[in-house]
Amino acid sequence: MNFDIKKIIKERWGQNYDLHDQFVNPQFVKVLRTIGFDKVYKRAEGQYLYDADGQRYLDFLSGYGVFAVGRNNPQIKQVLHDLLDLDLSSMVQMDCSLLSGLVAEKITSLTPKHLDTVFFTNSGTEAVEGALKMARGATGRSRILYLDHAFHGLTLGSLSANGNEEFRGGFGELLEGTKIPMNDLAALEYELKKNDVAAFIFEPIQGKGVHIPEDHFLPEAQKLCQKYGALFISDEVQVGLGRTGKWFGFQHWNLEPDIICLAKALSGGLVPVGTIVMRRDIYKKVFSKMDRCVVHSNTYGKNTLAMGAALASLEILEKENLVQKAETLGNALRQAIHEKCSEFEMFKEVRGKGLIIGIEFKEPKSFSLKAAWKMIHAANKGLFGQMIVVPLMSKHRVLTQVAGHNIDLVKLLPPLVITQEDVDYFANALRDVVSECHKFPGGAWEVGMMLAKNALKS
């Protein structure tokens, strides 16, 4: 065989952004070049990325939470090599594969006992789509309730439960759904009383904005759903499998959801995979007889490599005690951020659970900083977060992100394999950047003005 992928990569190295500009997503390329994120990474290992010059970058984004066990985890790589060497029969379709059964067995050993049936998908948004479909099929109802600021994916069904208008606009009529304000039990019950609600779907901790519900809200919401016959769906795609310091985010409130959705960390970052885990009686109402045994199906959901990656990821999370580590280092990271930054007037708070963390900023009181703050926000309400994110990358080589549109919040989703050294490095880097933002005029505000000019042009 003459096809040599290593040779192709070597010959075309560095053309990444030009190719994407021409063939993939020019607008995204423009954003990355504007904020200085147009790096070409040569390799990755654990919590680090490396460029062609060997410079190391601390990855506090982890592919939106995919790399819980670290990038290019050697154990998962070995499993994938072994599976390829075995030449197994994958995706026969008219069979039941061993590996998918083993993954389902392992997942249901971690979930509450009532969640005992697994359907495999290819991604988080597909898991959400399937969960909504299962809820409608099991209840005979059509409407979905979701929270303000919710993010459950961007395919059409998932988009129908998206609480952010910047994603919904321009795509026409969506599925029947109603947005509920966070913590508003009266609004939730008002909608449930109409007896047409198939399900209420929620993220235990919202990815957009790192919003955490008040402690009473989700337990009471569960009771209301049970009272009015709506299913209670926990979207664990980003927060599940250890990120919050527990296996599942809903465990922080001792909930018993009817369906949960998993993905991201389950993949090990190497082969996409997701799951819907549900009560058996929901399954029976949808797959109600033999001629409906494939009433919901997909082609790639149980493929051999995905199942191997999932099984290995679960083993690593458990054997390396990464769930407990996420809790311990998450607490240490939030404490370090607070200690390093709480003296600054634009620092509002740091919040989160485990290793999903939001750092929020607020309008300052001092005259010069307040004027600069208003000037930046007049150009674009989300620019101040970029004033933190951009120098974290350019000066300290730390990869983070702004946590949503029109908010002053930086989000951290580090791999669960980070160390105390990484925690200390990040906290010191953040202090340096925040300190610079409190000097006006200064370099940080020059970055802000550059970003503002580009925002206005856009």
Image: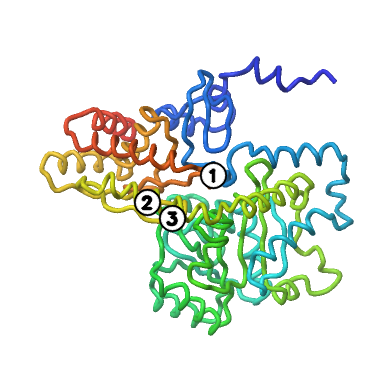
Residue depicted at 50% across the width and 69% down the height: 145
**Can residue 94 be seen?**
yes
Query: Which-is-in-front pick, marks 3 and 1?
Result: 1
Q: Residues within 10 Å of mark 1 (few under 14, many from 20)?
A: many
Q: CA distance from mark 1 to mark 2?
A: 16 Å
Residue depicted at 53% across the width and 56% down the height: 324
Q: Which amino acid is tagged 1?
A: Val
Q: Which quadrant does the C terminus fall into?
A: top left
Residue closest to the far top? 11
Q: CA distance from mark 3 to mark 1?
A: 31 Å
Q: Residues within 10 Å of mark 2 (few under 14, many from 20)?
A: many
Q: Which amino acid is tagged 2?
A: Arg
Q: Position of residue 173 (x, y in %)?
A: 53, 59
Residue 171, numbered label: none
The residue that label 3 is drawn on is 164
Q: Position of residue 408 (x, y in %)?
A: 31, 47
Q: Nearer the viewer, residue 375 or 346?
A: 346
